[in-house]
Amino acid sequence: MSEEIEKVKCLIIGSGPAGYTAAIYASRANMKPVLYQGLQPGGQLTTTNDVENFPGYPDGITGPEMMIELQKQAERFGTDVRSGWITKVDFTGPVHKVWVDGEKEVHADTIIISTGASAKYLGIESEQHYLNTGGGVSACAVCDGFFYKGQEVVIVGAGDSACEEAGYLSNICTKVTMLVRRNEFRASVIMEERVKAIDNIEIMYNTEIDEVLGDGQNVEKVRVKNNKTGETTEIPCTGVFIAIGHKPNTDIFKGWLDMDETGYIKNIPGSAKTNIEGVFVSGDAADHVYRQAVTAAGTGCMAALDAERYLAAKGLH
């Protein structure tokens, strides 16, 4: 443990659109925010090649570039951006305690949690390869579906989110092949029926991806396997969408903050407040519905404004 405890007015945990937007607002309000970037500086957007749906970028921008610009904007107003990640918290008293990298202790009057969520993937080497090249594997149909307009795609998943994304893709793509691992959907009946009624969606049950195939840069097809018969088939496609869920990065807050069964932090409706006074949440750590950069940024703004009001009410600002 380091000997000296650092005291800050506003600590922001996480560095995606939510964290950086919170930092911009907090620093402009003279809250002198300290932001720790976490394990994935820039968050999920750093794995996105092209962002075309964030307002203000008429020609689009790459995810990493956008995060660099957001960081610069936060720093311009005085945010102290640091590398490192929070390994432990203690929310027992009015002063919120956190430990950075298991060593440094920081006491904060307010904390804004922007730790985001991580998409779940299949873990196949070829899937990860084409995810990294940006050549055809994605975990967000709303973000990336546009790039596959008029093409054939595959979607993996059987829950409500997978059905929703399949429906979205069916309006853009000529054909959507939906791979369902079991012999039934996990989705609600209404979502399942909606997908089954769409002409250009083909559903393959008891089917899993065996390999993602392409030219090394772009996806050209997938080899799938029937997990009952062992039979393999190749499906031509240019895009593969993995819709098997997200895991919020909130484990260190368990036992302190109210969460749903998946681990998403519950906010008090209409605010960024959590069940702990002075601790606020923004972005995908609390949002399992929209999961967009622009909505994350909006809740980052809310969290900073709520934190500023909290400090003012306590006479700390």
Image (tube, grey):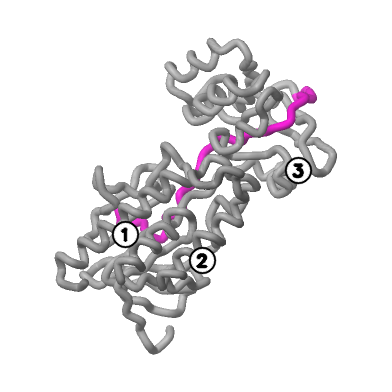
Segment colored magenta: 230-257
Disc 3, SS: helix
Q: Quadrant where the N terminus lies? A: bottom left
Badge 1: residue crowd in 10 Å (few <14, some 14–19, many ≥20): many
Q: Position of residue 119 (x, y in %)?
A: 55, 45
**Left or right side of 218 for 286:** left
Looking at this rendering, what residue extends furthest in the bottom direction?
A: 3
Q: Earlier in the sequence, mark 2 or mark 3?
A: 2
Reading the image, the residue beneath label 1 is 304
- Circle nearer the viewer, 1 or 2: 2
In front: mark 1 or mark 3? 1
Kindly identify the amino acid type of the residue bearing the numbered disc 2: Lys
Which residue is under mark 3? 126
- Determine the CA span between mark 1 and mark 3: 41 Å
Residue drawn at point x = 24 percent, y = 59 percent: 276
Determine whether the residue tagged by mark 2 lies in a helix, strand or loop: helix
Q: Nearer the viewer, residue 249 or 296?
A: 296
Above or below, 234 relative to 52: above
Q: Position of residue 55 (x, y in %)?
A: 48, 44
Residue at image mark 2: 72
Q: Is residue 265 visible?
A: yes
The C terminus: image quadrant: bottom left
